[in-house]
Amino acid sequence: ETAVFQTPNYHVTQVGNEVSFNCKQTLGHDTMYWYKQDSKKLLKIMFSYNNKQLIVNETVPRRFSPQSSDKAHLNLRIKSVEPEDSAVYLCASSWTGGGDTQYFGPGTRLLVL
Amino acid sequence: TQTVSQSDAHVTVFEGDSVELRCNYSYGGSIYLSWYIQHHGRGLQFLLKYYSGNPVVQGVNGFEAEFSKSDSSFHLRKASVHWSDSAVYFCAVSRNNNNRIFFGDGTQLVVKP
């Protein structure tokens, strides 16, 4: 049963455009994440938000910015997309604390032409 | 620095075969070890987790994994695979005092009929 929702499922855009992806979780978790998954299925953590505070910010380009209105929502904005941004973006959530299981959304596939 | 190594990028078996997907990690402290599964076009789903106690942990759909401290391993096994087990499997390690999960590169399992 899906409890982490992502929109859109798929997005095609041109280089230089701005895009925004949405994520919502209904599990009551207090931590949310964004991952980038490339064409080889490799996962890279991008951001982690705990109670609306950024607690992990990996070395991602500055054109990426997470946006959170409350602990159930974590959006991702890309200000000016580049071809290398083409990937699947996965949102996840968990409770705070070590080892807690992460629950993933279905992903948003971005294609930059 | 924690690392997770999945030595096999691809594994192909026939339906009904047994399978073992290998995972080795390097970390010297208290950690959680997990396996996640990702079906094509979907997000990751939690399979099982080990922290302490019985080194053999049971997961969903007949999967189990065995922790070995001496080998620094946490291999995933299934006695009899089904075609629906075809997916990418990720091994993951996290510490017991933060949410950061380190994922391996994944193993693509193909189950032929």
Image (cartoon, coloured by chain):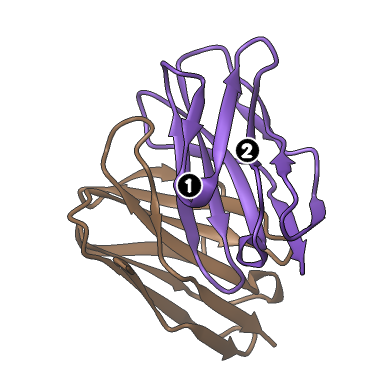
Chain colours: A brown, B purple
> Where in the figure is residue B80, as x and y percent of width and height?
66, 50
Foreground of the two, A54 or B76: B76
Is residue B55 at all visible to an observer of this figure?
A: yes
Q: What residue is disc 1 on? A: B47
The first of marks 2 and 1 along the sequence is 1
**Image vertical order of residue A52 relative to residue A22, above or below:** above
Q: Chain of mark 2?
A: B
Q: Which mark is residue B10?
A: none
From the top left corner, tell me how far across and down residue B12 is, in percent.
Answer: 82, 56
Would you place residue A48 above or below residue B95 in this image?
below
Numbered disc 1: what chain? B
Whether residue B109 is situated above or below residue B22 in the rendered picture: below
Residue depicted at 72% across the width and 39% down the height: B20
Q: Which residue is mark 2?
A: B76
The residue under the point 70% across, 88% down is A113
Residues at marks 2 and 1 touching, judged by CB atoms closer than 8 Å: yes
